[in-house]
Image: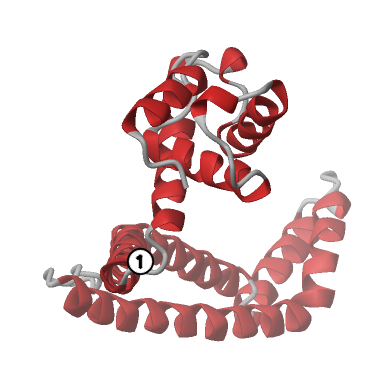
């Protein structure tokens, strides 16, 4: 272990030759690692091999500063220094306690972030409810219109009207209008079945959105949307 202040300062000056490549903790870790291979290391005996060892260790932790922007270098420098401090103090009971508190704080922050994200999602969903309900109501109105067109009595009256008009006005060719009604007459029962199914599904979705409106209003502490029409 190098403990002499002059020797430390001398090595530190060497290690800082490229844009402050390392901090004191990283330097200490690097010099400790080099000294494990050479227990007799001292500043006066700092040869090319030892310089290369220290340099390689620092580079593995902090990278080559020559190719970094100021911002990236600052982040890398701080990260390498923090990592080195942890290594130097890994046997300390206070460091273990600090680690424990940091883990607890990180977990608390994670849970808080998770809760905030959930609230943002709930708020966005809450805001979207009125538009979603209006789309479902538009679907119900369309179903009602289609059902009116497919009413058996209405279809019968319309076809009889066209047929009678043709009988009274033989000079007018109403065959095209009659042919246009045939698909509607033939498939009316099938279409009503589809509309009935769609009607049931739409009412179910509408009821789900109304319940969701109550749930989200309680979760967010906001008054519920007025989704029921007068």
**Eyeballing the image, is 200 above or below 14?**
below
Q: Which of 167 and 198 is in front in this view?
A: 198
Asked if residue 71 can be seen in this view, the reply is no
Location of the C terminus by quadrant is bottom left
Between residues 91 and 148, which one lies in front from this camera angle? Answer: 91
Query: What is the quadrant of residue 200 in the picture?
Result: bottom right
User: Circle 1 sits on which residue?
Assistant: 110
Task: Identify which residue, 76 or 219, lies in the foreground.
Answer: 76
- Marker count (numbered): 1
Name the one closer to the observer, 91 or 144.
91
Residue 103 spot, x, y in % from top left: 35, 70
Which image quadrant is residue 40 in?
A: top right
Instruction: Give the image's coloring scheme.
Output: secondary structure
- Determine whether 106 is above or below 35 in the image: below
For the point 31% across and 66% down, the residue is 95
Is residue 188 visible from the viewing direction of this image?
yes
Residue 13 in the image, given as x and y percentages of width and height: 43, 18
Residue 62 at x, y = what percent?
Answer: 55, 33
23 on left or right of 202: left
What residue do we see at 34% from left, 72% from top?
96
Residue 105 spot, x, y in % from top left = 27, 67
Relative to 168, residue 99 above or below? below
Residue occupying image coordinates x 32% and y 62%: 113
Q: Helix, strand, or loop for circle 1?
A: helix
Q: In the picture provided, is 195 more to the left or to the right than 173?
A: left
For the point 70% across and 79% down, the residue is 194
Q: In this view, does 59 lie to the left or right of 77?
A: right
- Label 1 crowd (10 A; few <14 / some 14-19 / many >=20): few
């Amino acid at each position: 272990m190098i403990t002499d202040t002059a020797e430390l300062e001398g090595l530190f000056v060497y290690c800082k030759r490229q844009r402050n490549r390392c901090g004191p903790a990283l330097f200490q870790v690097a010099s400790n690692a080099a000294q494990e291979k050479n227990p007799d290391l001292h500043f006066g005996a700092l040869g090319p091999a030892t310089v290369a060892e220290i340099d390689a260790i620092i580079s593995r932790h902090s990278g080559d500063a020559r190719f970094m922007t100021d911002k990236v270098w600052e982040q890398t420098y701080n990260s390498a220094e923090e990592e080195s401090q942890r290594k130097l103090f890994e046997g300390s009971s206070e460091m273990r306690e600090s680690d424990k508190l940091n883990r607890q704080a990180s977990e608390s922050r994670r849970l808080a972030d998770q809760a905030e994200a959930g609230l943002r999602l709930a708020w966005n969903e809450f805001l979207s409810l009125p538009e979603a309900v209006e789309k479902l109501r538009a679907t119900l109105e369309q179903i009602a219109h289609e059902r009116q067109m497919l009413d058996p009595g209405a279809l019968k009256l319309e076809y009889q009207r066209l047929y009678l008009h043709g009988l009274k006005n033989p000079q007018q060719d109403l065959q095209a209008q009659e042919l246009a009604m045939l698909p509607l007459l033939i498939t009316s029962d099938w279409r009503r079945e589809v509309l009935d199914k769609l009607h049931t599904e739409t009412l179910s979705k509408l009821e789900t959105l109304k319940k969701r409106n109550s749930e989200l209003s309680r979760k967010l502490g906001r008054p519920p949307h007025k989704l029921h029409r007068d």
